[in-house]
Image (cartoon, grey):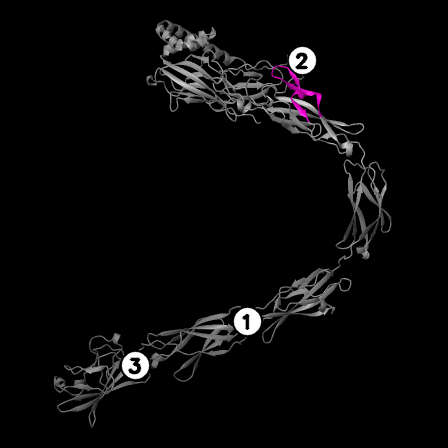
Amino acid sequence: MAICGPPRQCGGPAVRVLVLAAAWALGGGQVRYSVPEEAKAGTVVGRLAQDLGLEAGEAEARRLRLVAQGRRASVEVSGASGALVVSSRLDREELCGKSAPCALRLEVLVERPLRVFHVELEVTDINDNAPLFPAARRNLSIAELSLPGSRFPLEGASDADIGANAQLSYTLSPSEHFSLDLQKSNDRNIIPDLVLTKALDRETVPVHRLVLTASDGGRPSLTGTMELVVSVLDANDNAPQFNQSVYKVQLPESAAEGTLVARVNATDADEGINSEVTYTATNFIPLSGRDVIAVNAKTGEIRLTGALDYEEVSVFDFRIEARDRGSPPLSGHCSVELEVLDVNDNAPEVWVTSLSVPVAEDAPVGTVVALLSVSDRDSGANGRVRCAVWPAAPFGLVATFAGSYSLVLREALDRERVSEYEVEVRAEDGGAPPLRARRGVRVPVSDVNDNAPAFAQAVYTVLARENNAAGAELARLWARDPDEAGNGRVSYSVWEGGGGGAAAGGGWRAASSYVSVDAESGRLWALQPLDYEEVQVLQFEVRAVDAGEPPLCGNATVQLFVVDENDNAPALLPAAGGGPGPGAAGSAASGPGSGAWWAWAAWGAPAGQVVAKIRAVDADSGYNAWLRYELWEPRGKGPFRVGLYSGEVSTARALEEADGPRQRLVIVVRDHGEPARSATATLSVSLVEGAEAALAAAGSSSSSSSGSGLRAAEGGPAAAAAAAAATNVWLVVAICAVSSLFLLAVVLYGASRWAPRAAVLSGPGPATLVCASEVGSWSYSQRQSRSLCVADGAGKSDLMVFSPNFPPPPGPAAKETQPEPPALLDTVSGPPSFPPSLPLSLPLSVPLSPAGPSPDAPCPLPPF
């Protein structure tokens, strides 16, 4: 017999063959060989020819071969060497199954002479098969109430190998509830049992997952696994539990049938039918509770099935049982205490037994108006009644005897304040909650004429736009007289001695020349169109008289403010002698809405140099008189620009010869009214040499002082030609003039630097501050004005103040206090113009600010 290990352990093409026995029987010989399964093809099993006693080469010559016997032997005889070799895969389990030993009987045939030999080939087992369970997963269902020690047989694994390779052992994954017990059914098989070591609780762990492992005895050992899924079957081991052991409920006895008393809730930790709970009510004390209380078996809602009566039963005690549907069923209990609250179900009743109306306004205190009777059918505290009257004044209740009251007068009456009283007598018992009853009593009061007409306001402020139509309604006045009939009829009139208005010409006109009031309706009419420039404020009195005997009257003061309309266009002012720049300027008036100016500018003048200043004034007030200046022609980027609010014409860049000898500027002056009104100014700027410009400035100054400005405007070109011819003569004069002006400026600067600061305010009466700014003063309308100068070294700000807008009182003294003709203020501390003053005055305590906006920015307007 030849023995070889597993094919992977055999080295070389031949296998060491051990001949166990070679015997020749009487009828022939028999040879035995052994080979492991899974030996590779070509593996030498044994030297068959040599073992049969054949010489070398004789096996091929005598045709040594195997004779087939019906199934594949997986071995063959090598023709050249006569060796028995493996020809195909040897699988012991396929050839012999579980039979042991696995011996293949072969017949070997040789010729010349013909002989038959018997060869036995034993295929030995190797550990090439792992244990195999019938299924990869096994589901087990174990009752929750199974006792520890309970056994549950498991199917073992099978191993196709034999011998030690098929000896199986089992292990179980760690578990606190289960263990594995191995039982030998016979000498060969071991059956694993699953043993319960700890009681199960489905509510804690409903499913346990384990792994059963089988290992064979081979070297190395092979294993197989199977998952065990243990589902814990619920047992009815949990009784229903209520969330409260005692439910305390209070209901009023007036609760309607079907009212929810309480909702009890019990839960069961089991599942399925073991957790289904039904509710029942038991143990009623008193037993009459069964007739008025019921519980829903499914939802646990306790509702009233009848009416409660506190006087019969004040407390119901009963128990609720929750029972599951397990086998056997388990139950839980809770107690319910229903307290019935007493309800005062009978309200008091109030009757008026006697009534004396109407009551005179001058009735004395203590007069009995009505008699009342009060009762309540309840008893005890619910039957005790308290009464009160509302409102508490001017009537009151006086108790005469049990259940009877008198309604009496406690305060004096005033029909004008309250002409009729709706008195309410309120009765309330002492129940919980108390019930109330009310009885209304209507008490009218007769009238006495004791009230004069009274206006809603002592002073009426009326705003009327100027240029209104004659007959337009300005306002409606109303005086109230609370009396009745003729005592309450009121007529209106303008009191002639009550005031008037100041006319622009300096006279005083009565208010009745401007307005009239309707005697019946109190509507205030305008008798003529109003002109803000003529009169700004009218103040007069309106008298209201009733028809009583004797008649009573009341007065009200009316202040009529005329609101300015933008009905005046800006008016251009003539030039003031010399301009602020190096060029002289002149003007020629050509109409109220237009004007012509001329000025000189020197070649090479830097950007920002002021050439001329356009000045205008607007007769209107407020925004209607706030002026802005716009350069209309030429458009685009020209050499000149105009300050938006100052009117100063300055160079936008350095002047060049390419700009030509003359520039014509069209400047539009607009106000801020709606719609805006405007005026147009035409400025002709002649561009000359610096010396000629200085000469022109000097000539313009002298001509201005002699009143020849207009003539200079008319002869502008001729004068320019003459000045050019006399350049050399006037050059010396210009240099002297400039030097003198420079010296004078130095002296003035030094004097202002070291002079003490002072502030002088001039003007009649209290003054009103309008605006102060470094950039200049406001443009202003033709109204009374004064200036306030602040000495601070150099000129920093201008301050415009105005007298109050109210006219002086009538009489001879009015002539002395008439405002002076408006004077135009031309300040040079700042070039721009500012918005005009407003009609309403402002406090003089507005602080002066040393810093102001940019030169072209408007000064902030005071609030309207």
Residue 562 can be seen, yes or no: yes
**Quadrant location, the C terminus:** top right
Residue 50 can be seen, yes or no: no
Judging depth in this view, the residue of 843 and 517 nearest the camera is 517
Which region is colored magenta?
493-517
Sequence order check, earlier mark of 1 and 2: 1
Residue 6 position in % (x across, y down): 27, 77
Indicate left or right for 858 with 132 as reference: right
Indicate left or right for 566 with 729 as reference: right
Tell me the chief SS of the magenta region.
strand
Report the mark closest to the observer, 1 or 3: 1
Which residue matches tag 3? 94
Are dots 1 and 2 in contact, CB under 8 Å?
no
Sequence order check, earlier mark of 1 and 3: 3
Q: Secondary structure at mark 3?
A: helix
Residue 523 position in % (x across, y down): 67, 29
Q: At label 1, which amino acid type do we have?
A: Gly
Could you give the CA–CA distance between mark 1 and mark 2, rounded to whole angstroms? 113 Å
- With respect to residue 409, does 667 lie above or below? above
Q: Secondary structure at mark 2?
A: helix
- With respect to residue 200, does 761 lie above or below? above
Tell me the number on the disc at residue 429.
none
Could you give the CA–CA distance between mark 2 and mark 3, rounded to whole angstroms? 149 Å
Q: At label 2, which amino acid type do we have?
A: Ala
Which residue matches tag 1? 272
Judging depth in this view, the residue of 411 and 566 nearest the camera is 566
Residue drawn at point x = 20 percent, y = 76 percent: 13
Circle 3 packing at 10 Å, graded few (<14), some (14-19), many (20+), is few
Asked whether residue 50 is drawn in magenta, I would say no
* Residue 239 image-quadrant placement: bottom right
Which residue matches tag 2? 813
